[in-house]
Amino acid sequence: MTQEITIRRPDDWHLHLRDGDILNEVASFTVKHFSRAIVMPNLVPPVTNGRLANEYRQRIVEAANDQRFTPLMTIYLTDNTDPSEVREAFEAGDITAAKMYPAGATTNADAGVTDVKKIYPLIDVMQSIGMPLLIHGEVVGHEYDVFDREKIFVDTILSAMHDAFPEQKIVLEHVTTADGVDFVKGASKLVAATITPHHLMVNRTTMFQGGIRPHLYCLPIAKRREHQLALRKAATSPSTKFFLGTDSAPHAEGDKQSACGCAGIFNAGTAMACYAQVFDEENALEHLERFASLNGPAFYGMPPNDDFITLRKLDAPVATPAPVGSERIHQFLPDTPVHWQVVDAS
Ligand code: NCD
Ligand code: ZN
């Protein structure tokens, strides 16, 4: 039996679009299915102020080449970010949010924040103007096991920050653990989380299925299956605190399939099919629209989109699409069958 679902057009609340040739090669994948996207600022050098954000927006708009797509810009926080500049850029509408990478936590995070206390004066300003703080929630350091880094960050740094700034809007980006989910559920309504398609579909065992799978490597790293199940439960629950953020992060094939492969999964083109597959498996298709198209705008104080997309369940599973562009960027699709496909997003 053919099954179809039509939902309001989704938005991607966590996206890496890169710059230059890669931006031009990947932008259309997002534009096809999503109306708006929170664009991550971890370029080299990073987007650290409103002027750079505006220049980057312009390059994105040109690459996207579609009036319906709106990039929502963010700035990359450093130890030295000037609170009054941030206030000005936010109030001018140049930026929608600020992204906090703990220094060294992930791809292009070297210039990030070395100690969150250093940005407490800035968070005080952000809290007063209602500006969302988007967080890569992992501690950094050789002493921390890579699989424990999110939990330790949540238990120590994030909970203290939420206590110190209870009115601050916070998004725990790409949550990967039951601990992160529990924190978000227990925190005030101003705290939310994005969930990626890959963290819903793979776990740390999948990453080593039959050999090492560099194209499933991202940060935060996929955790145990029990955490994957907690994420699936959170995403498909009626909660309004969890919403779609693909963390689509394109890297050249050569940088992934390497002696020291880098972190990041490119899923912009396959994300909606994967989310639908997961919601179907969890018997929760009726909640897909809320997760993909309603919770995010509500959190950011924006209206939902007023156009729609349609997904269809096919008899045969979809095949992994070909790598993209001159750099052969691999597209995410799990080994487990995905039967859903976007059939109308016009
Ligand atoms: C992202 C990237 O490549 O920019 N990589 C990733 O593994 N998710 C950075 C990030 O979001 O951590
Ligand atoms: Zn990311």
Image (spheres, rainbow, N blue to C red):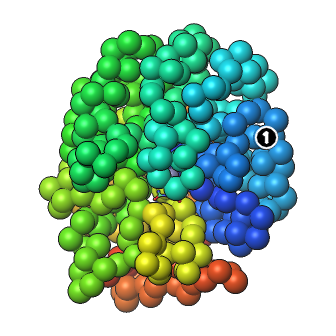
Residue 210, given in percent of the width and then of the height, sits at 23, 86
Q: Is mark 1 within 8 Å of ligand 1?
A: no
Q: Locate residue 217 relative to residue 298 in the image: left or right.
A: left
Residue 123 versus residue 24: which sits nearer the camera? 123
The residue that appears at 40% across and 76% down in the rendered structure is: 214
- At label 1, counting other C-alpha atoms closer than 10 Å, the crowd grade (few under 14, some 14-19, many 20 or more) is some
Indicate the quadrant where residue 137 lies. top left
Left or right of 324: which side holds 148? left
102 lies above or below 106 = above
| Residue at screen point 33% across, 58% down | 221
Q: Three-letter amino acid code at disc 1?
A: Leu
Residue lying at the far front of the rendered structure? 142
Look at the image and tell me in which quarter the C terminus lies.
bottom right
Q: Looking at the image, which residue is at 71% across and 15% down? A: 84
User: Going by the image, does 58 lie left or right of 262?
Assistant: right
Residue 212, visible in the rendered structure: yes
* Residue 345 visible in the snapshot: no
Classify mark 1: helix, strand or loop: helix
Where's residue 22, x and y in %? 70, 69
Q: Name the residue: 30% across, 24% down.
A: 159
- The quadrant of the picture occupied by the N terminus is bottom left
